[in-house]
Image (spheres, rainbow, N blue to C red):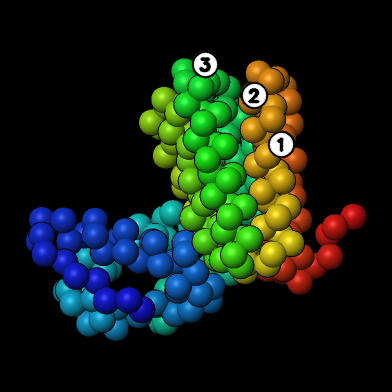
């Protein structure tokens, strides 16, 4: 586990929670890995109280589960949850795109075009892992330009939950190319101001991501 440096004592609880949550969502703390309160407190250099509170909050959020007489462990990846996340993301991001097209259509097109160009340059030089951040930026541009703060928070949370499942599949070149094609489809629909088409493109893109996740993360063949 990465060491956490805490300087502001007033925000220890929040920082410990955010630190553990980030490591779980990024895959640095793997599914089924045990989380031992005393060990975590020692590693990040704090008392057990903020760690205990962080673990409780992470359990409430559904990222970890309590094991009697053992402690906590990161919840096992669940194919059903992938289906749910993708379905909810399609709705949330479709709404975000609709709002962004109303509030900042020119800036939206500019940012998405720039992102796609950067993504293509990254895979051209073989930097497939760079796409993880570029993919996040693409979707967050849409949510941010929607102007809805709660919508942005929901979109970010859902995307980060999905990254737990996608972290392996997103590193393959074929999957990255398919994802970029999905981004291009969304951009084309936005440029045409085709609102139904934007929603369809977002749904198709997330459906492809779902199939890639199920195939790689769960060793299932769902290409059909």
Q: Quadrant of residue 148?
A: top left
Instruction: Count how many numbered circles sit on residues in the image.
Output: 3
Gap in angstroms between the C-alphas marked 1 and 3: 19 Å
Secondary structure under the numbered disc 3 in the rendered image:
helix
Q: Which mark is residue 185?
A: 1
Closer to the camera in the image, 145 or 112: 112
* Image-based side of 25 in relation to 221, left or right: left
Say which residue appears at 41% left-offset and 82% top-offset. 69
Say which residue appears at 24% left-offset and 56% top-offset. 14
Q: In which quadrant is the C terminus drawn? A: bottom right
Q: Which mark is residue 151?
A: none
Residue linked to disc 3 = 102
Say which residue appears at 74% left-offset and 62% top-offset. 174
**Residue 79: image x %, image y %?**
69, 60
Residue 214 can be seen, yes or no: no
Q: Residues within 10 Å of mark 1 (few under 14, many from 20)?
A: some
Q: Earlier in the sequence, mark 1 or mark 3?
A: 3
Question: Measured along the vertical axis of the image, is residue 125 above or below residue 196?
Answer: below
**Residue 166: image x %, image y %?**
61, 61
Q: Residues within 10 Å of mark 3 (few under 14, many from 20)?
A: some
Q: In which quadrant is the N terminus drawn? A: bottom left
Question: Measured along the vertical axis of the image, is residue 111 above or below residue 76?
Answer: above
Closer to the camera in the image, 76 or 30: 30
**Residue 221: image x %, image y %?**
84, 65
Q: Which mark is residue 191?
A: 2
**Residue 21: image x %, image y %?**
38, 61
Question: Measured along the vertical axis of the image, is residue 93 above or below residue 38?
Answer: above
* Image-based side of 188 in relation to 107, left or right: right
Q: Earlier in the sequence, mark 2 or mark 1?
A: 1
């Amino acid at each position: 586990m990465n060491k956490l440096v805490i300087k502001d004592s007033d925000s220890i609880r929040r920082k410990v929670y955010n630190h553990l949550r980030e490591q779980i969502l990024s895959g640095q703390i793997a599914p089924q890995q045990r989380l031992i309160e005393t060990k975590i407190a020692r590693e990040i250099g704090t008392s057990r109280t903020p760690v205990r509170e962080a673990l409780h909050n992470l359990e409430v959020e559904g990222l970890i589960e309590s094991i009697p007489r053992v402690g906590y462990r990161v919840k096992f990846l669940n194919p059903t949850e992938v289906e749910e996340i993708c379905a909810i993301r399609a709705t949330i991001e479709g709404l975000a795109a609709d709002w962004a097209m109303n509030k900042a259509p020119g800036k939206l097109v500019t940012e998405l075009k720039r992102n796609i160009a950067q993504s293509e340059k990254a895979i051209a030089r073989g930097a497939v892992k760079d796409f993880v951040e570029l993919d996040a930026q693409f979707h967050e541009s849409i949510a941010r330009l929607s102007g809805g703060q709660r919508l942005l928070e929901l979109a970010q949370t859902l995307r980060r939950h999905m990254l737990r499942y996608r972290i392996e599949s997103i590193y393959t070149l074929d999957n990255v190319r398919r994802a970029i094609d999905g981004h291009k489809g969304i951009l084309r629909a936005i440029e045409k101001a085709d609102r139904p088409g934007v929603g369809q493109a977002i749904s198709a893109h997330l459906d492809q991501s779902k199939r890639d996740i199920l195939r790689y993360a769960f060793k299932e063949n769902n290409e059909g």
